[in-house]
Amino acid sequence: MRRDSWGSRLGFIFAVAGSAVGLANIWRFPYIVGQYGGSAFIIVYLACLFLIGFPVFMSEILIGRTTQTSPSGAFLKLGKSPFWSWGGKMTIATGFIVSSFYSAVAGQVLGYLVEAFLGHVHHFETTEQAALHYNSLMENPLWGLTFHGLFLLFCLGVLLLGVRNGIERGNKIMMPVLFGVLILLVFKGLSMPKAKEGLHFLLTPDWSLMTPVAILTALGQSFFTLSLGQGTMVTYGSYLSPKENLLKSCFPVIAMDTAVSLLAAVAVFTIVFSAGMEPNSGPGLIFHTLPWVFSQLPGGYVLAVMFFLLVVLAALTSEISALEPTIAYLMDEKGFKRKHAVLLCGLGAFALGIPSALSYSLLKDYLIFGLNFFDFASSLASSILIPVGGFMAVILVGWVWGISNAIDHLKQGSEDLFERRAWFVRYFWFSFKYSAPILVILVFLSALF
């Protein structure tokens, strides 16, 4: 059976950027910037991206492009032992687990987009009222399950069409729309009365807030923002031509991911400051603070619809990519047709995601190690499985396959660029062998403890 591939470099860039751009960019990045010193945190984050995020990202794409198969077969080919095959399978399982609970929380965002269209999220007088509205929806098990299922159906519709006609074409539509909505939100924020205060807060570094915890947070954000450690980038890399210029294909992805994070911070800071608040209210920002902010500002209805549309688009592109490694595995190694693999994955993700979707209603009193099911699944993935998967990928490239082999394959398709920029070899040699593995261990330990 002929294996799928990307139709163009632009299609690959949009698809991989769609995977990388998710809730971590639009939901999490603004509030941690607010907590940890504005542009001081951004500077440290960009340094971490250079030292850990980009190298691990490149190692996973390189593994996929070199082997042209799913993570299980890819790790086996380069590692040459069953242990590495099981390592690849673990990353596939990680992506599948992520897809289940991610769909549950993304379903909440989809539900809030519907609420915004109906005019229900821009009439709050206090943040407490916004929180009560959120809690009332979350306590309704039918609401959570319905939007968990609807969100997955949208994703499966794209996945059924295949790599070129589904993932690539879908991202070519969704990513420009996402950027368009985000830019409109930025312009709206900049036009507001206290926009200068928000920009001043964002652009003025407060180094006193750059504590060890803040640095570890920047490390984690630079790692988690790129969908690493879950088989996605290995799978997407496997759909590339073996002669594709990886630097020209991958650097724009990092630039787009970073741009979305920064633009989201500008939009949130200017809008929230104009309502007389600071954007450091933690994870409740998206469902508690922002709906109240929309209620205080002119054009609150339009702002609410645009914002939740933005977050839904980001979640859709990320969820699609989280499911694709399992689909590729079933097709490459089990002989499934795409239709059957997609339907099986969709049903499995829905079933596994049911406890997460019910974690704040029917199952709120069922705890695992003191956590509800959603928090447990999220913690398991982010604290253990994803860091371990990213660590295995960069160790496979830098130490098992061999750094010389890795650099030689990395140069394929971009020999001229490496000749003009000789320092690229030193950068990748150092990051594959030392900086990335060491920093992934720090991410793992900080997430675990």
Image (spheres, rainbow, N blue to C red):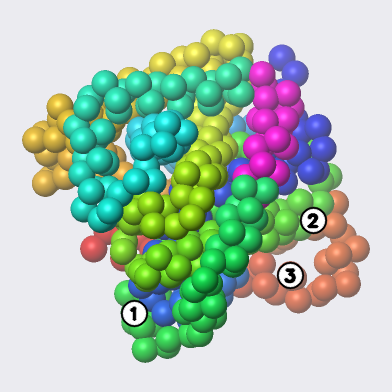
Give the residue at x 41% y 36%: 119
240 is higher (above) or lower (below) than 252: above
Type of amino acid under label 3: Val
* 204 sits left or right of 338 in the view: left
Q: Where in the figure is residue 430, as x and y percent of width and height?
A: 61, 72
Give the residue at x 87% y 60%: 415
Give the residue at x 50% y 85%: 204
Is the C-beta separation of discs 2 and 1 under 8 Å? no
Q: Nearer the viewer, residue 278 or 396?
A: 278
Specify which label sits upstream in the sequence, 2 or 1: 1
At label 3, counting other C-alpha atoms closer than 10 Å, the crowd grade (few under 14, some 14-19, many 20 or more) is some
Type of amino acid under label 2: Lys
Which residue carries the number 1 mark? 212
227 is higher (above) or lower (below) than 111: below
Q: Where in the figure is residue 52, as x and y percent of width and height?
A: 53, 65
Q: Nearer the viewer, residue 28 or 93?
A: 28
Query: Which SS does the magenta portion mostly show?
Result: helix
Which residue carries the number 2 mark? 248
Q: Which residues are magenta?
A: 161-179
* 240 sits left or right of 284 in the view: right
